[in-house]
Image: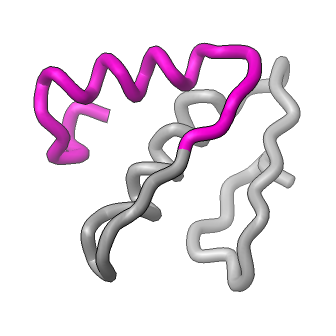
Amino acid sequence: MDRLGTSQAELPCYTASLTNPQGMILVTGTTGSGKTITLYSGLRQLNDTQNNLCSVEDPIEIPLFFVN
């Protein structure tokens, strides 16, 4: 997560948002700005046997085990 290129002020906000039991995180930007890597980094942080994660995208850019 610390290699995403976000500022030191923004990273705690993103990781704190990932700990909320409900909600939505919208990541917007131009092509090549790091949207996919940012979202998949969050999915990797949350990916364990206690969570039921679902990603809705077509085509799947980065397949992750245990993510529906």
Residue 55 x %, y % = 75, 56
In this rendering, position of residue 47 left or right of residue 7: right
Q: Quadrant of the C terminus?
A: bottom right
Residue drawn at (46%, 15%) of the image: 16
Residue 60, compared with residue 37, is above or below; it is: below
Q: Which residues are magenta?
A: 1-25
| Location of residue 58 (image quadrant) | bottom right
Q: Is residue 3 left or right of residue 51?
A: left
Give the image location of residue 11, x and y in percent: 27, 27
Spot occupied by residue 25 in the image (x, y as percentages of width and height):
56, 41
Residue at (12% x, 24% y) in the render: 8
Residue sitting at x 87%, y 34%: 52
- The answer to which quarter of the image holds residue 31 is bottom left
Q: Tell me the quadrant of the picture where the N terminus can be found.
A: top left
Residue 60 in the magenta stretch? The answer is: no
For the stretch drawn in magenta, the main secondary structure is: loop
| Residue 10 % position (x, y) | 23, 28
Q: Is residue 7 magenta?
A: yes
12 sits left or right of 41 in the view: left
Q: How is the image coloured?
A: one colour
The residue lying toward the viewer, choosing from 23 and 49, is 23
Using the image, determine if residue 48 lies above or below residue 65. above
Question: Which residue is found at the position 16% from the left and 21% from the top?
Answer: 9
